[in-house]
Amino acid sequence: MPARLSPYEIMERLVAFPTVSRDTNLPLVDWVDDYLNSHGITSHRYYNETNDKAAIFAHVGPEVEGGIVLSGHTDVVPVDGQPWAADPFTVIERDGKYYGRGCCDMKGFDALSIWALVEAHHRGVSRPLQLALSFDEEIGCTGAPPMIERILETLPKASAVIVGEPSMMKAVNAHKGGRAFWVHMHGFEVHSSLMHTGVNAIMYGAKLIDWANKINADNMARDPSGVGALFEPPWTTVHVGQISGGTAHNITAKDCEFGLDFRILPDEDPEMWRELFLAKVAEVEAEMQAVVPETRIEITEKFGLPGLAPEHQGEAESLVRAITGDNENHVVSYGTEAGHFQTGGYSAVVCGPGNIEQAHQPDEYITVAQFNAGHDFMKRLLDRL
């Protein structure tokens, strides 16, 4: 009989794969594939365009609709420049905590989900259980939409999805969505004493940044909607966190680049915010080209992430509440793949072990108590299936 690994043993193996988003995740996917196949579980893959990353998904139980999906991601953020006390890709237990990159976000939940899938297969379940592990979540949840499309083409459609981002095992039923853009202002260089004949990419870029400040001020001044009132802050935000440009203090800047992103309330239309931004870009670009026609603004859309909207008596939320006993409302301002699953027609909720405050940190950890709480959750889920 093949070995049935414990959740901790599976987590050890997953963390050992340095699946930083810029690198391949295929060795991890191969391991998961081999482990599931050793237990008679057929898995499926979806590859990215360059075939160096893959999502993996599987189904156990009767080949019918109405199952439960356990959803996680395989990629982690970099450890570069972080002061780790030990090897970040080796799980170390110390002072009631499991340390390692991804233990919290979110290979701990991935391990619990793989364990639950194998257990469900061996125990037998009357309601199906599915596993979905994506790639490129950490760079905008870009791997989830094509994975979900492939799952719907390949497996019987489940009725509820549990996305296991760290939530201290609380039921998160709403989160903001996101739109992210990279802006490249192409100006025209002249001596700064003749700046009126040139186009300063930095100064024109500042007009877009000032527009973001105005949008934030306007949104903050409005009375929040019913959904908005659940969040902190209770409005859609626009943020610029990186900027670079210019050659010298006495030359009008030829180039300026910056990132601009929206955190959008789930009851607002992300496309509306995209159109408003692009309209402002067109306005500023016209001002630039009135001075020097060959100047322009180049916009690269990095990602679009739908929010997770509260569901009235949603099946996923109801299931998690029944298992955990948590009946409070919990929302977060960061995004997850739950919004993509909801857009794909699933009932979705976020619930996983660990504290999001530990995610992406040096010496990232999940407490033993939280990991065990996740294990208990999976046991109770299996009983229900």
Image (cartoon, helix red, strand yellow):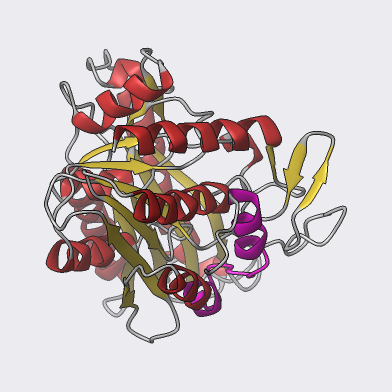
Compared with 105, 19 (above or below) is below
Q: Which residue is drawn at 38% across and 41% down?
A: 212
- Is residue 289 located in the magenta-colored stretch of the structure? no
Looking at the picture, tell me which residue is in the foreground, 4 or 202.
4
Q: In which quarter of the image is the C terminus?
A: top left
- Residue at image position (49%, 52%) is 115
In this picture, is 145 found above or below 351?
below
Residue, far front: 1
Q: Residue furthest bottom?
A: 50
Please give the name of the residue rendered at 28% of the width and 40% of the height, measured from the top-left corner: 307
Image: magenta residue range: 7-29
- Name the one closer to the observer, 39 or 302: 39
Query: In the shown orientation, is residue 123 left or right of residue 82?
Result: left
All told, the count of numbered labels is 0
Residue 297: where, in percent of width, then height? Answer: 32, 68
Q: Quadrant of residue 9?
A: bottom right
Q: Where is residue 242 in the image (x, y as percent from the top left)?
A: 55, 55
Asked whether 15 falls inside the magenta stretch, the response is yes
Whether residue 115 can be seen here: yes
Where on the picture, by quarter, is residue 95? Answer: top right
Nearest the viewer among 174 and 134 is 134
Q: Position of residue 43 (x, y in %)?
A: 33, 71
- Answer whether residue 221 is visible to the viewer in this image: no
| Residue drawn at point x = 31 percent, y = 44 percent | 338
Please provide percent x and percent y for residue 100: 72, 53
Q: In this image, 157 relative to 191: left or right?
A: left
